[in-house]
Image (cartoon, rainbow, N blue to C red):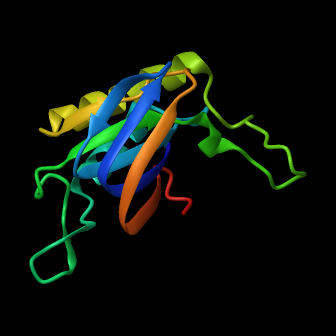
Amino acid sequence: MRAVVQRVSRAKVTVNERVSGEIGLGLLVLLGVGSDDTETDAKYLAEKIAGLRIFEDQGGKMNCSVQTVAGSVLAVSQFTLYGDVRRGKRPSFDDAAPPELARRLYELFVEHIRASGLRCETGRFQEMMQVELLNEGPVTILIDSRKTF
C-alpha cells in the first residue's frame, strides 16, 4: 500500500456536490492499494500514520503525532498512486489492486485508524471526488508498506 500523508489545518472531500468527509487539524491520507497487498499492509500503514510525528511541539520541532494533537484523519482512496509512467507518458495501472481487494483493504485501513482512537472521515470509494486542503508547512510524507521509498 502507498500513502501520501499531508499535515493539514483543514481538508474536505466532496462527491456530487455533497461533502463526504471533512476535518480540521489533522492528516489527509491519499491511499493506494497494490495488487499484492494484504491485511498486514493495511495494519502497518494505519499504525505508522497514527503515530507519525509530523506535528510541531512547543519548541517548534516535529515531535507530535496526530493523536498527540487531538487531530483527525481524512482517508481518500486513490488508485492512481500505482500509476507507472516509466515507459511512455500514459500511466499504466497494472500494479493497482482490483476494486474488490482495494475496497476491502481501504476499509480495513480506516477501521484500524478508528481503532487507534482517531476520528477518521472518508471519501467515497470508486467515485469522482474533489479534495480540498490547506497543507500546513507544507508537510507531505510518502509511505509505502513495502518500504520501497
- In the rendered image, is residue 69 in sight? yes
Above or below residue 131? Residue 89 is: below
Name the outermost residue toward the front.
17
Give the camera-side residue of 140 and 97.
140
* Quadrant that contains the C terminus: bottom right
Residue drawn at (11%, 50%) of the image: 70
* Residue at 85%, 44% in the rendered image: 90
Question: Which residue extends farthest right?
Answer: 88
Residue 91, by quadrant, is top right
In the drawing, does residue 10 fall left or right of residue 149?
Answer: left
- Along the line of sight, which residue is nearer the eye, 117 or 134? 134
Q: Determine whether, in the image, residue 62 is placed left or right of residue 14.
A: left
Residue for point 27% across, 42% down? 73
| 110 in relation to 17, above or below | below
Left or right of 15? Residue 81 is right
- As displayed, is residue 108 above or below residue 144? above
- In x, y percent, where is residue 113? 24, 37
Image x and y of residue 17, in percent: 47, 22
Q: Residue furthest bottom?
A: 59
The answer to whether residue 96 is above or below residue 50 is above
Name the spot of residue 147 as percent of width and height, x first: 49, 58
